[in-house]
Image (cartoon, rainbow, N blue to C red):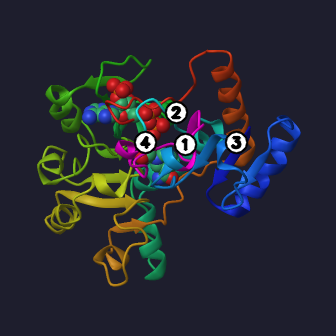
Amino acid sequence: MSFVYKADPVRGAVWAELFARQMPELPFRIWPDIGDPRDVRYLAAWQPPDDIAARFPNLEILFSTGAGTDHVDLSAIPAALPVVRMVESGIIAGMVEYVSLAALSIHRDWRTYLEQQRNGNWQPHRVHPAASRRVGVLGLGMLGRAVLERLSGFGFSCAGWSRSPQHIEGVACHAGPEQLQAFLKRTDILICLLPLTDSTRGILCRPLFDQLPRGATLINVGRGGHLVQEDLLQALEEGQLGSAILDVCEPEPLPPGHPFWTHPRVTLTPHIASMTQPETAVEAVIGNIRRHRQGLPMIGLVDRVTGY
Ligand code: NDP
């Protein structure tokens, strides 16, 4: 029986040390050194191999090393093989930091002051209370909820949108396509934390932008595939959107010469909002292996119908 890790080998070496301490009875291997494929019971991968079923006939669990699973072609994974995404505190902490930074930078006009400094311009502007700024989060899952909890703490007026109705203390929760318009109408800073699925691809498009208050900001930390890039450029051009902060793009890396690189109202980061942290990730994976062995439900099990 063995565990195979198929992602960044440098982080894999840290996983190996942690496994050796916390689950020494389970041999841990780093791709491509997989040993006898018939021994492999658990695979943690960013990109699983195409021939997963044939290659690992005794595989019991496929772990995604990321919080999303859009990079995995679920149709190529045997229906009976559980796919488990990464639900771990390190990813949550990173995302809360990034989105807080992004939302506060919009709220406190950071871009304006950086530009003023470059121009030698000492010009204060009125500071508005956070309560006057309406933040809205698309996606009320592990990350959306944690982000809203922190942003509520700053005093922002918070709302969220999900597929099924949710209740979060102090957050105006909206659900389903029929409540999307009401959610957008009251959102000055829109944060996308949706999974990328057939029903969310391209959701950040012109008709959606047009329902936001004029001059709203987009923070996309979901996936590049959520965004229709030409629609964003047009909405910025026409002033319907004031600015955008993008951590994710399609494709990644963004090709040289793409307008986002130099757009004065686009801030771009290279998909670093949050990263899986080996210490907490290994704890989560081992916890799930133990749960699986005891016949208990695993945390982060992907629903093969909804795709997240
Ligand atoms: P979860 O699966 O925990 O939550 C997903 C949320 O999105 C749920 O609230 C769900 O609704 C909602 N949702 C899904 N489909 C729809 C839909 N069609 N309409 C409305 N709401 C929908 O995901 P996480 O919070 O863990 O992660 C979200 C995404 O963040 C990941 O999939 C990944 O793409 C991205 N991410 C980005 C990172 C980065 O560094 N930029 C790092 C980590 C993740 P419901 O509650 O009803 O199920």
Residue position for label 1: 96
Magenta stretch encompasses residue 80: no
Of circles 1 and 4, the one toward us is 4
Cα distance, mark 1 to mark 4? 32 Å
Ligand 1 has an atom within 8 Å of the beta carbon of the residue at disc 4: no
Please give left or right for residue 291 compared with residue 192 in the image.
right
Residue position for label 2: 146
Residue position for label 4: 77
Which numbered disc, 2 or 1, marks the residue that appears first in the sequence?
Answer: 1
Cα distance, mark 2 to mark 3? 38 Å
Q: Residues within 10 Å of mark 3 (few under 14, many from 20)?
A: some
Residue position for label 3: 39
Which quadrant of the rendered structure holds the C terminus? top left
- Above-or-below relation of 127 to 306: below
Tell me the SS state at disc 4: loop
Of circles 2 and 3, the one toward us is 3
Query: Quick one: 240 or 64, which is closer to the camera?
Result: 64
Tell me the SS state at disc 2: helix
Which numbered disc, 3 or 4, marks the residue that appears first in the sequence?
Answer: 3
Which numbered disc, 3 or 1, marks the residue that appears first in the sequence?
Answer: 3
Q: Quadrant of residue 303?
A: top left
